[in-house]
Image (cartoon, rainbow, N blue to C red):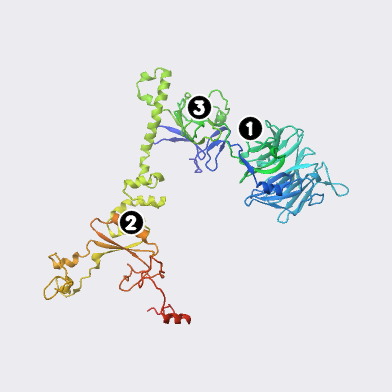
Amino acid sequence: MDFSGKRVAGSHALPNGRDRYWFLDQIAGWREAFRQGLELTVPDGNLILDPLPGAAALLLDAEIQASEFACPSALATDGCGHVFVIDTATNLIKRIDLERGSVETLLAMGGKGSGPREFREPRGIAALPSSGIVVSDTGNHHIKIFLPPAYALVQDWGANDVLNQPSPGDGRKMFRWPWDVAVDACYAVYILDRGNRRIQKISADGTWQNEFANETFVNPIRMAVGPEGAVAVVDAGSNQVIVIASGSRQFITGVDKPRSVAFGANEKIYVGDAEGLIHVFEPAAKSENSYRNIGAGTTDFSGEIVDLVWDSNYGLLAIVAEKFNGRRQRVWKINPNGAPVSTGRFITQALDSKIPNCQWHRVLLNAQVPNGTSIQIESFTKDTINPDDRDGQVKDPDFNQWKFCVKAGDSNPDCLVQSGTGRYLWLRLTLNSNGLESPELRSIKAFYPRTSYLQYLPAVYQEDEESRQFLERFLSIFQSEFDEFDRLIDRLWQLFNPGSTPEKDLKWLAGWLALVVNPDWPEAELRSMIKDAFQTYLQRGTVAGLQKAIRDYVGVDAGIVEHFRLRQLPLLSIAGSVEGGVRLWSPDFYKRLQLDANSQIGSFQLVSKPEPRVEALSWGAHQFTVFFAANPYGFDDTERQVTQVVEREKPAHTQHTICPVFPRFRIGVQATIGTDSVVGGISYLVLNRLSTLGYDSILGCSQQEQKLRELGLTPRPVVGRSSLLS
């Protein structure tokens, strides 16, 4: 942990206090010295093989494209779901709404001619960050800028003759067949001046800034602007792509017949060729000042990729001259994440054990390895390195001193470090795909120093070096499993802490406490229930405990009345009496059989208890009633849940009655304040549920009430009008 609070890669001690390890991942840092053919996933930051462009589909329906476009030749995206397309045949500009799939013709400009708002065979278009557009009016040798909402013409660059007609020129802000335009984040406009074989850079306000001329330009046709002002130019004449950045020129070769170029994510460059392939390049090490060919993605069409742009939301968009369709040009969408490249390599910087002649133990990967893919691990150790080059001592993937450790086809592989002793360790990982899927590397652990089970065997087992190495590798198979058991045991206490137990183990922990888990509980509530389980058990079997259980498992507040509390024995208080008073009930209170007093059939009870003085106390001693507010239209499920909880939580010797409380208040029936009386709205008649005549249903009103309603009156009490609360 550094002083900024960020987690950094470094040496960590295991719980047993002996082994240590280096941990590498996106958060701690990959400590990367070399990476080829790999990229980081978003947002996890795991390492996977670079994807190549794959399946393609028409951006719009074929019928829509046939009706809207005659010959689209250039396109640009504003990053907000709109694509601008130039139709060279009609000299019009179309705007595509990607979400709606609709096409709109920008009527404020276009049409064949040499006027300020007219075009003659335009070939390039770019979108400004302010939603304006820049058009390369190729046939008129002019560059024009239009700004919304009315697309007013605000800039018109180019030369004019004595008759004020557009003409070619070779000076500043003059052009000869300007073919393509691009815009950077600072509103600077780059113009590919094809006839003059140069690139001019002009601010959107018309201020001339710079010129990129190159004697190697033979026939430049397309251009793209990337991060930090890097410019990639497709030179069809020299059959290469030239990247101009920071005053230097880098040449991308190996693509036959390049036709278009675009900058994508992670500074990648996509180059479309004349056969429908899209080649992907990534920056090499900054010191090398070059680009590395990742591979070529096969699309679903055969044809020349006339123009290519990158949209962060929709991927690659292209105009294709389709060979299978009579060279007809249409707009396509290409998936940038198709099949992965076949292989990729990753080399770490020097990992320092700070132990001279350290024998590094093993490497453990947290990785997903699909069937048919693999990860190969190699190592190199050294005891001393140049202090000025500690972070990048080994960068060459073809370095001939790598020691093979393992080539694994299973997830989460581990292996022994096969290199000899050395304070510093470098690792080289090679990821291989199956053509469809890629391994995914999440983290690396490099353990040191070596603690082998071989040290517990007699010394004779270590005398022969070859036998010692074999036995050490053989024992490491079991040691890896046993070490994992030890780590699980060391962390076992965390499983019994409701705050640190993984979510998948919460039900297991609840089982230890005999806690019945409600499947509807969210994770936070389940952790809270486990945490409070001991205090809950202290209340179990009490009124408060039963109410809490109903609230926790059903989500309703219940009131519980113990029947013995309903016994109100009438007493006459007498001053000075030892018993505190005299009972006032008559023999009829018990209703015992008594001749000449209580002997009428049906008016007495046969009671076997011989103690009439305590008979009144024994009534209701083990009974209680549970009241809970209920919806009269659907209380069945709530009543069932409350019954289940009560039967599970009540003392075994008690008897219970479940009483759902509906929004009513009925004198003599349901009128105990705070227990079973609820003042609420009218429960309207529902057939087969709330339809008991004279109890909860009203079929109509009386004739007198009908007459009152006709006059706008009502016999029912209305607060503030026909009723008075006192």
Q: Image point 34% across, 72% down: which residue? A: 666
Residue 568 position, x and y percent, is: 22, 70
Amino acid at dot 3: Ser
The residue identified by callout 1 is: 293
The picture places residue 442, in percent across and down from the top left corner, at 50, 37
The earlier-in-sequence mark between 3 and 2 is 3
Would residue 317 be seen by someone viewing this image from the given angle? yes
Q: Position of residue 677 (x, y in %)?
A: 34, 69
Q: Which mark is residue 32?
A: none
The label shown at residue 549 is 2
**Residue 435: image location, x then y, percent:** 56, 33
Mark 3–mark 1 Cα distance, whole angstroms, equals 26 Å
- Few, some or many C-alpha atoms within 10 Å of disc 3 (few <14, some 14-19, many ≥20)? many
* Rendered image quadrant of residue 16: top left
Of residues 674 and 92, the one nearer the viewer is 92
Q: Residue at x 57, y 37 (%)?
A: 39
Q: Is residue 41 above or below residue 649?
A: above
Mark with earlier residue (1, 2)? 1
Q: Residues within 10 Å of mark 2 (few under 14, many from 20)?
A: many
Amino acid type, mark 1: Asn
Rounded to the nearest angstrom, the CA distance separating label 1 from label 2 is 66 Å
